[in-house]
Amino acid sequence: MDYYATLGEPCAKRDILDQLFRLGMTGARLNLSHTSLAQCSSLLEERYWPAARQAGREGAHLILDLQGPELRVGELPQPIPLREGLDILLGEGGIPIPQTILQTVRKGQQISVDDGALLLEVRRTSRAVLLCRVLRGGPLRSKKSLSVLGEELNTPTLTAADLDNLAQAGRYGVTHILQPFVRDRRDVEVLRAELDRLGLRGIQVMAKIENRQGLDKLDEIMAAADQVCIARGDLGNSMPLWKLPAIQKNIARRCRAAGKPFCLVTQLLWSMEQRPVPTRAEVCDIYNGVLDGASSLMLTGETAAGRWPVQAMGYLIKTAGEALKAV
């Protein structure tokens, strides 16, 4: 069983990384939606890899989570409080968003922001701007995810930023690529071709299943990828949330039948971003995920932004360990 943290400010200190590795962490994810590999060079070369070696984990994993075709809010000078019932502008003169959304969205459609934390309804459209009503409010920050509910947008498999980061993957010891929003076998093949071109065939491809297209093409994606990642954040945005547990179980069952390793991620210990102790539901979720056959578990905001990264990793590993006794 592999246990992954997501690197961020709370766990970027050498002493915290030392503690995480001592607990049993086997690797970490670097989310490139908010940074670049080069910008993280000091973190990796001066803290992450030395901590892994100190803990005797020379074979630790480093996972790059690419930007891929995911759509995000642009840079904001500061967080914007969005109040329920407020009308806001997206696009020219307002909140910056990708041109793809401006060209595609229609009146009456809903836009999910930050994995569903915020919800907007499109009231008017034009070529350069959208007028939206806030249905579910909260603070809006830079680079948060965007999705148009019920709409599959045509976006490229690899962005220019992805290509730049892949070109440096060998230098920084990357072992796995977490490929977001995989839609079919071709997406995986495009990534593999680029890795081959760079002489990086040894890097494993973890295909994230996080939309309807990926679900529909799961069999061919499993055949093309080294691992599958059940990415419950955006996957939960693509359907009514109460349907997500059955979908997760279905993906896990099909991975087991195909002998394909799979990683479970998103909100495993979400409450521990703010609390030192998880909920009973969270530890039951982890336990059941292991019983369903997960080969790895990944923390995201719990270690990238939370107040209790070491405690979260401890609960993750101890809970999974109890489940492994029952397998």
Image (cartoon, rainbow, N blue to C red):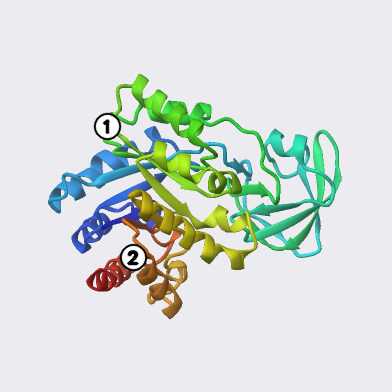
Q: Quadrant of the C terminus?
A: bottom left
Q: Quadrant of residue 61?
A: top left
Mark 2 neighbour density, 10 Å: few (under 14) some (14–19) many (20 or more): many
Does residue 145 show up? yes
Residue bearing the label numbered 2 = 290
* Nearer-the-camera pick, 199 or 80: 199
Name the secondary structure under disc 1: loop
Residue bearing the label numbered 1 = 202
Name the secondary structure under disc 2: helix
The amino acid type, in three-letter code, at marker 2 is Val
Q: Position of residue 264 (x, y in %)?
A: 41, 57
Label disc, if present, on residue 310 of the rendered structure = none
Q: Residue at x 35, y 28 (%)?
A: 168
The amino acid type, in three-letter code, at marker 1 is Gly
Q: Quadrant of residue 83?
A: bottom right
In the displayed structure image, the side of residue 159 where residue 148 appears, left or right = right
In the displayed structure image, the side of residue 154 where residue 7 appears, left or right = left
Q: Residue at x 82, y 44 (%)?
A: 106
